[in-house]
Amino acid sequence: MLSALSLALATAALLGTSPAATPLPLAAAVVQKPVPAPLWQPLTATQARRLGLPRLRPQQYQTVRLNLAQLRQVLATVPAGPAGPVLQLPLPDGTLAQYQLRTTQVMAPELAARYPELQTYAGQEVGRPANSVRLEFTPTGLRAMLIRNGRTLFIEPYRLHDTQHYICFDKVSLPAGSKAGFETSAK
């Protein structure tokens, strides 16, 4: 069987043309790129149980595994302007939503320079700009708050010191009293 290059050389010889002027067949011109692993992989109930109890205990949540290397590649391309890359984020129902990200600065410039590993982002859902995300990525992992269709959703590390496993949940699924440290009452 002839290789694509051999076929191109044979065709050039038959036609009396230079091999450099003979285009390679389309199949030879296509370079196969490896398909990247998914950014987020859902865990089965059995896989999640092996992790132990989650740090937070919402009544309903989705457990996922994050491909950290791929996330770092995406976040490294996020500009300060509005036209950043699209990042898929998991939702509590097991689906993914796409958000276009931009970098944000929440720290004073001196602190940001001193702690470059603390990165913050904001974005809107693709096709639904009223849905937004605030995201931070630090050495302790990723944390995100999504405002989606009037609901507040979170992505949080499954347990302390675990930057690979996360839970996605709706704020309303947190048990009564568990939000006391985050909410204040008007008096």
Image (tube, helix red, strand yellow):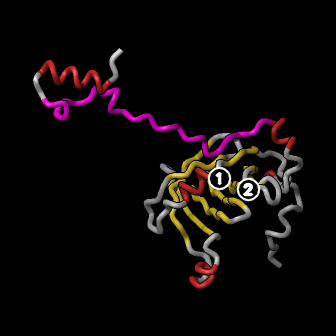
Label 2: few (<14), some (14–19) or many (≥20) C-alpha neighbours in 10 Å: many
The dominant secondary structure in magenta is loop
Q: Is residue 55 left or right of residue 2?
A: right
Counting from the top left corner in percent of width and height, residue 60 is at 80, 45
> What segment is highlighted magenta in the picture?
18-44
Counting from the top left corner in percent of width and height, residue 99 is at 54, 53
Q: Residue furthest top?
A: 1
Counting from the top left corner in percent of width and height, residue 68 is at 65, 52
Which amino acid does the dot numbered 1 rest on?
A: Leu
Residue named by callout 1: 68
Q: Is residue 25 left or right of residue 166?
A: left
Name which residue lies at 53% across and 67% down. Answer: 103
Q: Is residue 29 magenta?
A: yes
Residue named by callout 2: 163
Measure the alpha-carbon separation of dots 2 and 1. Answer: 8 Å
In the image, residue 56 sits, relative to residue 46, either above or below, namely below
